[in-house]
Image: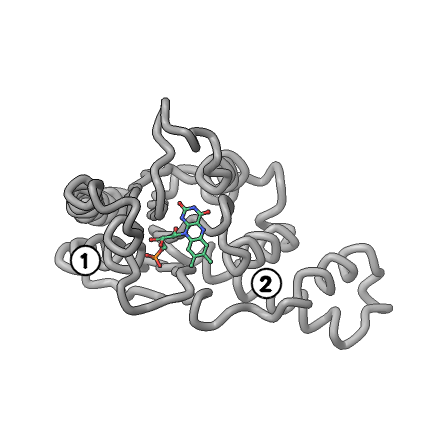
Amino acid sequence: MTLLRVDSSIRTDGSVTREVADALEEAWSRHRTGPVVRRDLGRDPLLAQAWATAVAAGSTPEAQRTPQQRAAVAFAAALADEVLAADAIVVTSPLYNFGVPHHLKAWIDLLITDPRLGPGTAPLAGRPLALVIARGGGYGPGTPRAGWDHATPYLRQIFGEVFGADLTVVEAELTLAAVVPAMAALVPEAERLRARARELAAEAGRALAERVAVAA
Ligand SMILES: Cc1cc2nc3c(=O)[nH]c(=O)nc-3n(C[C@H](O)[C@H](O)[C@H](O)COP(=O)(O)O)c2cc1C
């Protein structure tokens, strides 16, 4: 039984998404003996040109593909193999510039070039996937920036609707409160949300392990 963990924060020290995903992974590991496969898009970004090359390969007859196109298709297939081989998945995403990290978007785009993961295939139907999201600011209803988080709805749609996974979403907000002086009054709330996200992640890790055990 395999858990695929995909990280996308560009930092390691102090990363809230990594800390929350660690709580999920620890809970999973306590309940499972299966391996955790890691794809760290923040530390090891995918080659920027791979996606465009794979897309071009898609409209090029196989016999006429360049070596670069063949390599890009093979790379996308290897990424898709990793996803399809996982019994459960956790994907972490900071909010960057009101959107999804481009390393994560590049991974998703490459996956979708693989025919097994293209639109209409729902390749992860019924498979549990936890999304861990961290936002520096606050985006709740009634706040000045409500509706400015363009990452979470996109990620929900890709993993829940396009890939058909059974989603659990764990979110931490206000993560910049400790370092932005104007947010100082929000530090206690930020700490509460961070602790709550760790708890929810641990619950999600346990639930993922239990679901996978029942399905086995
Ligand atoms: C380049 C950059 C852009 C960011 N853009 C936003 C943003 O648009 N909105 C927001 O709320 N926080 C933003 N943040 C803050 C991050 O979402 C926040 O620090 C989050 O905790 C990062 O995830 P991590 O803790 O796992 O690294 C940004 C951070 C960086 C480094």
- 172, above or below 30, in the image: above
Horizontal side of residue 166 vs 14, given as left or right: right
Is residue 179 visible to us here? yes
Where residue 175 appears, x then y in whole percent?
Answer: 29, 49
Where residue 92 appears, x then y in whole percent?
Answer: 37, 53
Q: Secondary structure at mark 1?
A: loop
In the picture, the disc for residue 212 is none
> The residue under label 1 is which amino acid type?
Arg
Q: Are marks 2 and 1 in contact (CB under 8 Å)?
A: no
> The residue under label 2 is which amino acid type?
Ala
Q: In this figure, which residue is indicated by the disc labeled 1?
A: 32
Horizontal side of residue 22 vs 114, given as left or right: left
Work out whether mark 2 precedes mark 1 in sequence or the reverse, and give the earlier one. Answer: 1
Q: In this figure, which residue is indicated by the disc labeled 2?
A: 77
Where residue 40 appears, x then y in whole percent?
Answer: 41, 67
Horizontal side of residue 60 vs 145, given as left or right: right
Residue found at the far top of this picture:
142
